[in-house]
Structures are given as structure tokens and as C-alpha cells.
């Protein structure tokens, strides 16, 4: 697991920077697919003891495709659609993380030899994953495109720039008119009557035509500019459009990104949440199986129930698509993780004697651990896509991926030690979460 997280941390940064510079999504996806296939096949070969570790290391490199995909999504979809996409990705992630630990059960009766190597229920999973990745690679080869390298992306950026400029102007006009509202206030009744009586006048018709023309001016390109002669839908060369926004401006460096407070805050929050998530995931298993003697089947049924609840919750919160919505969801997730720690602490200390209350407490910790962790990952994508320009999205999401992997490493590998000093450790983590939520709430006025 250490090799998997280490390689994923490094590849996330490298792939994120590469994608911002070159935008070669298709070739990157194919290369990462081959890393995954090679890693799973090497995992099957028991020639040397370090082969499985090296195989997991190669599979971790393939995990660097996440910031590449998510960065391209933030460049090509508006925030209203982006929240739906990122919650859908997290929904699939929850399902896969729930199925992964029990996947060897599916291959329980597998036992054969392939090129002299024994394939059983434990390593057959790697063979299955290699086949799935090969199928994905074939689909990516034929279906995936480098969308943000397409000349049509110029038009998309230019239209967005014009619309954002006009929205900023309209906001400033509204603020100015709001300051002078007392001097220019007209009742709604008088305005409605005047508009009713003057709607059929020639002056009103002329104003209507003028407003329609102004709406058309929102779009910087006419049909003749976009569509070539002979009715062929071909874009004009970029050289003929000197005013087009640069498609590949120089991305921000890692130092510039880390100096941005708007970037550091989501990175710190997601780092803290993933530490709590990794700690809680192991601690729930220790408490349920070792202390309270739950069976694996009992724990699996509980996990499936929690996954169903989490999927329904993500489906509901996908409608929150603005920056301030994502900000408050992040505050809620941080507070929920603090609440999760306060429930785990008495469970680990065996302070709850009643079996019914104990079962309810374990169910609540499992729910809180998933419900307040995966949405945070989804909505930090929305937040970072707002505070960082389009040319550096993959880099900042690579930093986010690195923070998550480092947090999971710390959480998983320190769980046994923190269990010994759980009184102090969990109280400190709870205070960190609560203080972070308080600071985020106090900083709302400064941000908005």
C-alpha cells in the first residue's frame, strides 16, 4: 500500500503539470492504462518477493490520470454541470471502494495454472483488473479526444470571456443603481402601467429590436466566421483571429499555486478530512471485529447499507452548484468529521455497554465517515475550478490528489499507534476539525 500511495502522489503532480502544458488527454490516458495493465500482470508473477510491491507501484502511477480527467472536465463544463459530474464520479468511487475488499469472494472457486503460474482467488483479481483496463484502453483509443486542443475550444473560451465581462459590468451597474435607489425609485404599479400602454408604440418596437441586437452582440463570432465556404462546418485558422484567447497560456508554477490562500484553504481542509477518513476506516473495523466480535458478513451488510445511503445523498446534493454552496458543504463535512471522531472515541474505549446503542453508534460512524468525506472531494473540485484559471486546473487538482494521498498514508500507517493514545489523539483531531469549521465560517465575509 505504501508503494501504491507513493507512486500515486508523484504521478499526480507530474501528470497534472504535463496536462496543463500539452493537453494530451488521449495519449496520457493510454499511457496510464498500460502502467495499470503492466502493474497488475507483474503482481501475478511470484518470481520474487518484491514483484507484488513493484506491481502495486506501477498501478499507483496510473492513479495520476485522475487530476488529468478532472482538470479537463473543469475546463469544458460550467459549474452547474460540473457539480453533477463530480458527484457522479464520487458515487462510482464509493461503490468501487465498497466492492474492492470483498472482490476475492467472487473468485473463490478459481484455481488453475497460466503459463506455469498458479491463479487463485487472491491474484485472479489482478488478472481481472488487467482485462478491464485493457477494455478501457481500447475504448479510450477510439473514443477519447483532446478536446481542449481542438480549435473550437477557442470559441468556447472567447464566448465565456465576453459573457463574464458583461456580467461584471452588469453587477457594477446594479451596485451603482442600488446606491442611488432613493433618488430614482418608481413604484412597480406605475412601471407596469407605462410598459403596458407603450408596448405597441413604434418607439417600443425599435427599442425591442435594439435589445435583440445587443443580445446577439454577446457572442463574439458570427456564423460566417465559424463556418467556412461551401457550407462546410470548419473553423477558421487561429492565425486569422488575433483577438482569440490564448489556448495554452503558461500554467502557474507550484510555488505560485501554494502562495494562493484560496488554494491553500481547500487543500488543508481536504488533507485534514482524509486523515480522519483513513483513521476512522481502520478504527471502525478494529472496534467492530476485534472488540465487539462482529462477523465479516455483518460488517459487509452494514457497509452496503451505508453505500446506498451515500449514493442517495450525493444524488441530492449535486444540485448545489455555486461556489458558496460548495464552500458551506466543505464546512459541513469538516464539522461532520469532528462529530464522527467524538462517536468513535467512546466506542474504542468500550464505554457503551448496551448492544443496541453500540450497533447504532457503529452504524453512525460508518455513515459519517463516508457521507462527510466523499462529498468534500467532489466539492473541492468545484471550489478549485473557480479560484484557479483554466490553464492551471490539472496542476491544482494534482496538488489536491497529492494532499489526499499523503493524508491517507498518515492516517493508515499511524492508526495502530494512535489507537494506543486514542484519548489525546482523537481529542486533538476533533479540535482541529472544529476550529477549521469555525475559521471557515468566520471567513465567509472576507471571501464573499
Image (cartoon, rainbow, N blue to C red):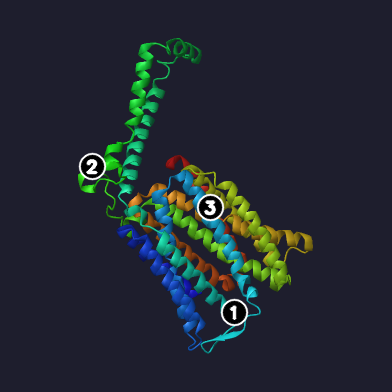
Please state the horizontal and vertical placement of residue 213, each as a whole percent of the image: 33, 26
Q: Earlier in the sequence, mark 2 or mark 3?
A: 3
Please state the horizontal and vertical placement of residue 410, each as a whole percent of the image: 50, 68
Q: Cα distance, mark 2 to mark 1?
A: 59 Å
Whether pointer 2 and pointer 1 mark residues with C-beta atoms closer than 8 Å, the reply is no
Q: Quadrant of the C terminus?
A: top left
Q: Which residue is mark 2?
A: 243
Binning the other alpha carbons within 10 Å of mark 1 as few (below 14), some (14 to 19) or many (20 upward) gives some
Q: Is residue 345 left or right of residue 318?
A: right
Mark identifier at residue 139: none
- Local secondary structure at mark 3: helix
Q: Quadrant of residue 13?
A: bottom left
Q: Cα distance, mark 2 to mark 3?
A: 36 Å
Q: Earlier in the sequence, mark 1 or mark 3?
A: 3
Figure check: 351 above or below 321:
below
Q: Which residue is mark 3?
A: 87
Select label 2 or label 3 by which is in front: 2
- The answer to whether any part of residue 443 appears in the image is no
* Viewer-proximal residue among 42 and 393: 42
Residue placed at 20% from the left, 47% from the top?
Answer: 239
Residue placed at 27% from the left, 37% from the top?
Answer: 224
Q: Which residue is mark 1?
A: 122
Amino acid at each position: 500500500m505504501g508503494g501504491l500511495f507513493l507512486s500515486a502522489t508523484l504521478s499526480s503532480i507530474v501528470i497534472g503539470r504535463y496536462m496543463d502544458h500539452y493537453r494530451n488527454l488521449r495519449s496520457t490516458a493510454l499511457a496510464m492504462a498500460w502502467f495499470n495493465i503492466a502493474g497488475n500482470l507483474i503482481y501475478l508473477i511470484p518470481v520474487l518477493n518484491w514483484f507484488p510491491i513493484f506491481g502495486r507501484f506501477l498501478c499507483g502511477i496510473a492513479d495520476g490520470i485522475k487530476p488529468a480527467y478532472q482538470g479537463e472536465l473543469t475546463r469544458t463544463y460550467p459549474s452547474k454541470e460540473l457539480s453533477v459530474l463530480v458527484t457522479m464520479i464520487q458515487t462510482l468511487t464509493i461503490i468501487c471502494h465498497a466492492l474492492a475488499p470483498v472482490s476475492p469472494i467472487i473468485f473463490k472457486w478459481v484455481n488453475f495454472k497460466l503459463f506455469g503460474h498458479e491463479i487463485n482467488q487472491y491474484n485472479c483479481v489482478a488478472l481481472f483488473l488487467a482485462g478491464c483496463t485493457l477494455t478501457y484502453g481500447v475504448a479510450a483509443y477510439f473514443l477519447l479526444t483532446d478536446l481542449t486542443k481542438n480549435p473550437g475550444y477557442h470559441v468556447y473560451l472567447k464566448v465565456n470571456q465576453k459573457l463574464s465581462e458583461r456580467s461584471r459590468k452588469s453587477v457594477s451597474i446594479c451596485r451603482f443603481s442600488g446606491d442611488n435607489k432613493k433618488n430614482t425609485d418608481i413604484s412597480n404599479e406605475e412601471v407596469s402601467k407605462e410598459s403596458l400602454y407603450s408596448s405597441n408604440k413604434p418607439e417600443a418596437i425599435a427599442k425591442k429590436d435594439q435589445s435583440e441586437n445587443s443580445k446577439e452582440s454577446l457572442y463574439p463570432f458570427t456564423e460566417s466566421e465559424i463556418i467556412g465556404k461551401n457550407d462546410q462546418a470548419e473553423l477558421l485558422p487561429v492565425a486569422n483571429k488575433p483577438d482569440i484567447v490564448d489556448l495554452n497560456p503558461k500554467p502557474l508554477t507550484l510555488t505560485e499555486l501554494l502562495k494562493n490562500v484560496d488554494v491553500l484553504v481547500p487543500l488543508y481542509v481536504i488533507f485534514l478530512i482524509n486523515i480522519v477518513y483513513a483513521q476512522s476506516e481502520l478504527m471502525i473495523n478494529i472496534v467492530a471485529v476485534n472488540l465487539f466480535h462482529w462477523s465479516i458478513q455483518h460488517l459487509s451488510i452494514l457497509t452496503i447499507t451505508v453505500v446506498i445511503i451515500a449514493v442517495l445523498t450525493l444524488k441530492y446534493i449535486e444540485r448545489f452548484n455555486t461556489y458558496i454552496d460548495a464552500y458551506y458543504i466543505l464546512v459541513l463535512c469538516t464539522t461532520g468529521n469532528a462529530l464522527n471522531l467524538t462517536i468513535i472515541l467512546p466506542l474504542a474505549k468500550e464505554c457503551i455497554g448496551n448492544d443496541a446503542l453500540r450497533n447504532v453508534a457503529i452504524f453512525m460512524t460508518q455513515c459519517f465517515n463516508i457521507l462527510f468525506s466523499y462529498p468534500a472531494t467532489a466539492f473541492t473540485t468545484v471550489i478549485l475550478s473557480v479560484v484557479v484559471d483554466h490553464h492551471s486546473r490539472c496542476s491544482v487538482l494534482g496538488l489536491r490528489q497529492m494532499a489526499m494521498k499523503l493524508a491517507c498514508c498518515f492516517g493508515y500507517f499511524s492508526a495502530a499507534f494512535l489507537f494506543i493514545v486514542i484519548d489525546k489523539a482523537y481529542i486533538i483531531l476533533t479540535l482541529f476539525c472544529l476550529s477549521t469549521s469555525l475559521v471557515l465560517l468566520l471567513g465567509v465575509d472576507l471571501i464573499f
